[in-house]
Amino acid sequence: MQIEEVIGQITAIDTECAVKAQERFDNLIKPVGSLAKLESMVTRYAAIIGKYDKNELNYPKKGLLIWGSIEQAAEAEKIMLGKWPVNILAAETGAQAVPLLVTAADEAEALAEGAILVKEHVAKDKLEMLGLGCLSDNDKLVIDAMAGAILQAAALKVPVMLDGAATCRALVKAMELNPLVKEYCFAGHVSLENGMEQLLEKVQLSAPLRLNITDGCGEGAAIAFTLFDAGLKAYKEMETFAEAGVHAEMKEFSHAEQVKEEQRK
């Protein structure tokens, strides 16, 4: 696989779908913006898949890919046997944690390897959202492989939940090859790793969680999956004022009324 071909397949997300999705959130029977980052996660998802109708915005099938080098074979085996916390947390959203060990010898091979592995797993398991974790703190070839994985996911219009500093470094690398790739990514949490907050600032992503987790092995992404599902549940199951017949006693919470109030100030 030529990574240049993958890069050329990445297109901008549908911002109009994001606007329409936010309009629905704003008109739900609740104060405007009260679900905060849950709303931004769902509106970004709508823009990625190009749908905003609540009946078409389904819960995506998720997979959690945990990357490492050959030196992390022992840790990878524990994940394969379901003996790490990430296995339990991922299962809560129906996801399976899968360890992937990078064997590439140089940057070009690593980018291609990451892209190939993602394409294979998305096709085989019919995945619609990916989480990325990493067993290696700062292994360049592992980061390159994850960059290839992010690029391939974006080309397939599959959103990616990042976990930890190494995955953010991979996004930085991917953005150097195609800046549009950032639009397909979410930050799962702010880990305690050195440079984590600076990396999030660099890629201009805001994480919904600060769990004081000391690494980026996937646990934060798995928990963020749960938050994403909660936001999507509110989007699909809560009623707008119009759907509910607009109860007079709730009128002051409506988006239109709040806009009018702001204009009067």
Image (tube, rainbow, N blue to C red):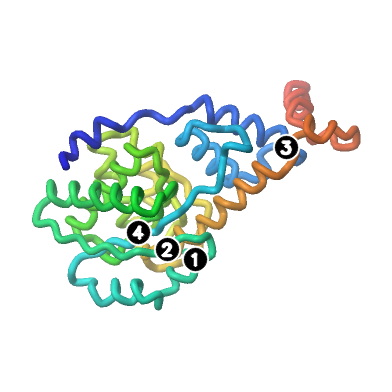
Q: Name the residue beneath numbered marker 1.
A: 91
Give x and y (percent) for residue 203: 36, 42
Q: Earlier in the sequence, mark 4 or mark 2?
A: 4
Q: Name the residue beneath numbered marker 3.
A: 28
Q: Nearer the viewer, mark 4 or mark 2?
A: 2
Q: Earlier in the sequence, mark 4 or mark 3?
A: 3
Please give the name of the residue rendered at 50% of the width and 40% of the height, measured from the top-left corner: 45
Q: Secondary structure at mark 1?
A: helix
Picture layout, residue 38 above or below residue 69: above
Which quadrant is home to the N terminus?
A: top left
| Dot 2 amino acid type | Gln
Q: As rendered, which of 152 and 261 lies closer to the eye?
A: 152
| Dot 3 amino acid type | Leu
Q: Earlier in the sequence, mark 2 or mark 3?
A: 3
Give x and y (percent) for residue 110: 17, 52
Q: Name the residue beneath numbered marker 4.
A: 65
- Distance, label 2 to label 3, CA atoms, is 33 Å
Picture layout, residue 205 above or below residue 227: above
Q: Name the residue beneath numbered marker 2.
A: 96
Q: Secondary structure at mark 4?
A: strand
Q: As rendered, which of 112 and 192 lies closer to the eye?
A: 112
Tell me if label 2 and label 1 are in contact, CB under 8 Å. Answer: yes
- Distance, label 4 to label 2, CA atoms, is 8 Å
Give x and y (percent) for residue 98: 35, 64
Q: Earlier in the sequence, mark 2 or mark 1?
A: 1
Asked whether the viewer can see residue 64, the reply is yes
Q: Secondary structure at mark 2?
A: strand
Picture layout, residue 227 above or below residue 250: below
Tell me if label 4 and label 2 are in contact, CB under 8 Å. Answer: no
- Distance, label 2 to label 1, CA atoms, is 6 Å
